[in-house]
Image (spheres, helix red, strand yellow):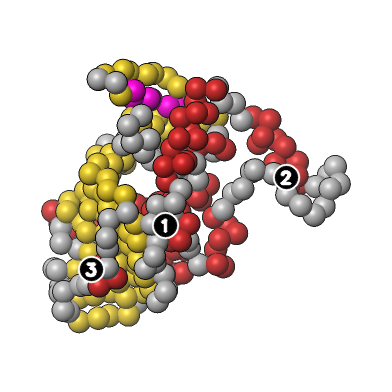
Amino acid sequence: MKRDFTWINTIILVFVVIMVAFPGMALPESLSGTLQLDLSEPPQGETKDDDPILEKYNEVMREISISDEAAKVVENIKKTVEGVKSVTMDVDVTEIRGKRIERAFVHLLASMEHGIARVEILEPSAMRGQILVADQELMEVRVYSPVNNQIAVRGLEDASKEVLSTLSVADISTFFDFSEYTVEVLEVVEKEGISTYLLQVEAVDEVLHVSVNSDTWFPHEICVVEGDAPGTMAISNVVFDPELTAEELSNLPRAKEVRM
């Protein structure tokens, strides 16, 4: 059971990433203050020199370092994500846990218009066929399992809190916005008119290597090279703004529903 719990959190992480990346897929309002970190301007309110919030803001801003080249890449990534209404992609997550290498491969569909995200699990084989559907309007997550032919239903807020207890809040809340961190261009490879950039992003408690091509400006690989859970997330077959119906996103096989 412990192994399954680890994999479920990995899959939900992918889902949370999409929710945070596209504003319309935000988490419940009660959690939004926890998830969003806006460093675009100092916090308003108290202006005393001993204000701990303002002091922390100034400390973070002083430590941010980014070259003009890196800033251009980061801005292009941010612009690519902004305004996207729906998306589909394949996500391959490899995570190193002690001496074990664990892998999950999923197909993800998400729509800002409908407020629904769908994750279809293809690997590992023990979880193949499981489908996770998160519906913002209904505020619930439904997980279909072919093994017992059941659909587990739980509140979206409860599921989100469970994930937040095991993941770095700062990292997922700014997943595709690297402007809040120190960023360095490690390598640029030119091929057939396309530049592939390798960025090093120094996040709060980990260091990421992000690969992105100039023809898409959307990261195709994100590696945690320093941190508690090193691993790689490879993103492929990305389609922006496909036509996705609410029925297509939420449809699950007929099965007994069990509320958690």
Q: 45 above or below 31?
A: above
- The answer to whether any part of residue 91 appears in the image is no
Tell me the amino acid under the disc marked 1: Met
Query: Tag 2: Cα neighbours inside 10 Å, few (<14), some, or many (≥20)?
Result: some
Amino acid identity at mark 3: Glu
Left or right of 41 on screen, residue 49: right
Q: What are the residue bounds of the magenta stretch? A: 195-200
Q: Residues within 10 Å of mark 3 (few under 14, many from 20)?
A: few
Q: Badge 1 is on which residue?
A: 19
Residue with the mark numbered 2 = 42
What residue appears at the point 16 percent right and 79 percent down from the top-left corner?
Answer: 254
x, y percent for residue 143: 27, 69
Q: Is residue 168 above or below residue 253?
A: above
Magenta segment includes 181? no
The residue that appears at 31% across and 17% down in the rendered structure is: 190
Mark 1 against mark 3, which lies toward the viewer? 3
N-terminal of the two: label 1 or label 2? 1
Residue 147, above or below 172: below
